């Protein structure tokens, strides 16, 4: 039998192909490294963002609370001013009303029309006289 000799193919490839393979492997490894780093540092970064968000939220609530309290204080002050003004207006209206009543009563008195007080006084005297007449009539 004849001997067959086989030549072993070598994995030697031209230089440009080896360079492309090497470059592609580096790209692949860089991608894996980036993925691993994001996996490790990404959760830490998210936690930092959460803490920053909580801090901003706390500061925002504080500002809103302070502004709300300031607004409520101003409202209370204005309410007090309005009540005070209302009381002063009522006092002035009472004074005007009394002055008006006095002038009307004076004018009516000058014309000869009796005042309410005069009518009440006369009515009381009339009641006394009526009672006196009834007692005199009973005795006779």
Image: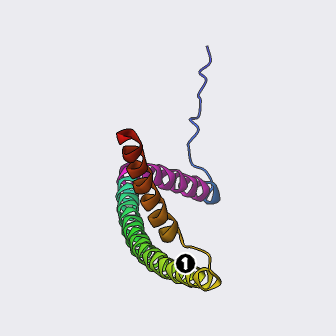
For residue 73, above or below residue 13: below
Q: Which colour scheme is used?
A: rainbow
Farthest residue, direction front: 140
Quick check: 33 left or right of 116? left
Against 2, is 129 above or below? below
Q: Give the range drawn in magenta.
A: 18-44
Residue named by callout 1: 101
- Please name the residue shown 37% across and 72% down the image: 73
x 48%, y 56%: residue: 30
Of the pair 15 and 40, the residue shown nearer to us:
40
Q: Where is residue 91 in the image (x, y as percent from the top left)?
A: 44, 78
Up-down: is 39 above or below 109?
A: above
User: Can you give x and y, in whole percent of width and height, for residue 109 in the image?
Assistant: 58, 81
As helix, strand or loop, the secondary structure at mark 1 comes to: helix
> Can residue 45 be seen from the camera position used here?
yes
Of the pair 107 and 44, the residue shown nearer to us: 107
20 inside magenta stretch: yes
Q: Does the magenta stretch include residue 53?
A: no
Pointer 1: residues within 10 angstroms few (<14), some, or many (20+)?
A: few
Report the front residue among 26 and 118: 118
Q: Residue at x 61, y 23 (%)?
A: 4
Is residue 36 at all visible to an observer of this figure?
Answer: no
Residue placed at 49% from the left, 70% from the top? Answer: 118
Where's residue 14, x and y in %? 63, 55
Quadrant holding the C terminus: top left
Residue 96 horizontal/vertical position (percent): 53, 82
Query: Which of the 4 quarters of the picture holds residue 1?
Result: top right
Number of residue marks: 1
What's the magenta bit mostly, secondary-structure-wise? helix
């Amino acid at each position: 039998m004849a001997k067959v000799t086989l030549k072993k193919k070598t994995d030697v490839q031209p230089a440009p192909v080896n360079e492309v393979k090497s470059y592609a492997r580096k790209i692949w490894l860089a991608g894996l490294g980036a993925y691993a780093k994001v996996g490790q540092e990404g959760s830490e970064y998210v936690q930092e963002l959460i803490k920053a968000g909580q801090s901003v939220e706390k500061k925002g609530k504080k500002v809103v609370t302070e502004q709300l309290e300031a607004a409520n204080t101003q409202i209370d002050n204005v309410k007090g001013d309005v009540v005070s003004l209302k009381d002063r207006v009522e006092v002035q209206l009472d004074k005007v009303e009394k002055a008006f009543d006095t002038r009307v009563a004076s004018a009516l008195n000058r014309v000869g029309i009796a005042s309410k007080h005069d009518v009440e006084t006369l009515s009381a005297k009339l009641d006394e006289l009526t009672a006196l007449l009834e007692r005199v009539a009973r005795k006779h």
